[in-house]
Amino acid sequence: QVQLVESGGGSVQAGGSLRLSCAASGRTYSPYVMAWFRLAPGKDIEFVSGINWSGGTTSYADSVKGRFTISRDNAKNPVYLQMNSLEPEDTALYYCAASYGNLIPTMRARYRYWGQGTQVTVSS
């Protein structure tokens, strides 16, 4: 079991930045992938970014490439999502998710553990 807690959401104007954090606890000694998903009003949940256990492999949705950066520190915990050049379209509830293994799935169903979510609101 892995427990996830997100933090760092908030409200910013377009062009601004936010950094989300996800702290994991529980069975964190086994290799696991961490990812961020988001759920915007009226839309399906969307994969945003993921990072493998070592931090050497990352994956991004096309919509955030070049603007968002995912990272994890040497102790593998927490995982950060640095979001720059935010756009109103980035407004969503952002969830942290974990999946045991070393490949980065982009499908929601592949992630067993989820945080409660943190709201990001970008105004124009």
Image: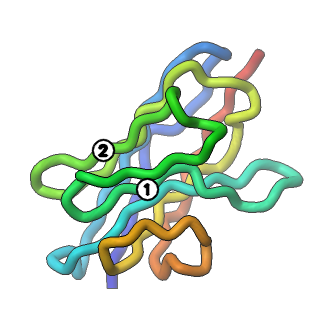
Question: Do tag 2 and tag 1 residues touch (Cβ < 8 Å)?
Answer: no
Q: Quadrant of residue 77?
A: bottom left
Give me the disc on residue 89: none
Which three-letter amino acid code belongs to the residue tagged 2? Ser
Provide the residue designation for mark 1: 50
Q: Is residue 2 above or below residue 20?
A: below
- Using a 10 Å C-alpha cutoff, classify the residue at mark 2 as few (fewer than 14 neighbours), some (14 to 19) or many (20 or more): many
Residue drawn at point x = 25 percent, y = 49 percent: 72
**SS at mark 1?**
strand
The answer to whether residue 105 is left or right of residue 73 is: right
From the top left corner, tell me how far across and down residue 121 is, in percent: 67, 32
Label 2, label 1: how far apart the Cα atoms are = 9 Å
The percent position of residue 79, horizontal first and vertical second, equals 31, 51
* Above or below for 19 versus 72: above
Residue at the (53%, 79%) spot, across then down: 110
Residue lying at 83% horizontally and 55% vertically, measured from the top left: 43
Name the foreground residue: 120 vs 54. Answer: 54
Q: Residue furthest left?
A: 74
The residue carrying mark 2 is 71
Question: Three-letter amino acid code at disc 1?
Answer: Gly
Residue 107, percent across and down? Answer: 60, 71
Give the residue at x 61% y 21%: 12
* Residue 102 coordinates in the image, percent (x, y): 31, 72
Direction bottom: furthest residue: 1
Left or right, 55 with respect to 113, comes to: left
Is 59 drawn above or below residue 106 in the view shown?
Answer: above
Secondary structure of the residue carrying numbered label 2: strand
Q: Earlier in the sequence, mark 2 or mark 1?
A: 1
Quarter of the image where the C terminus is located: top right
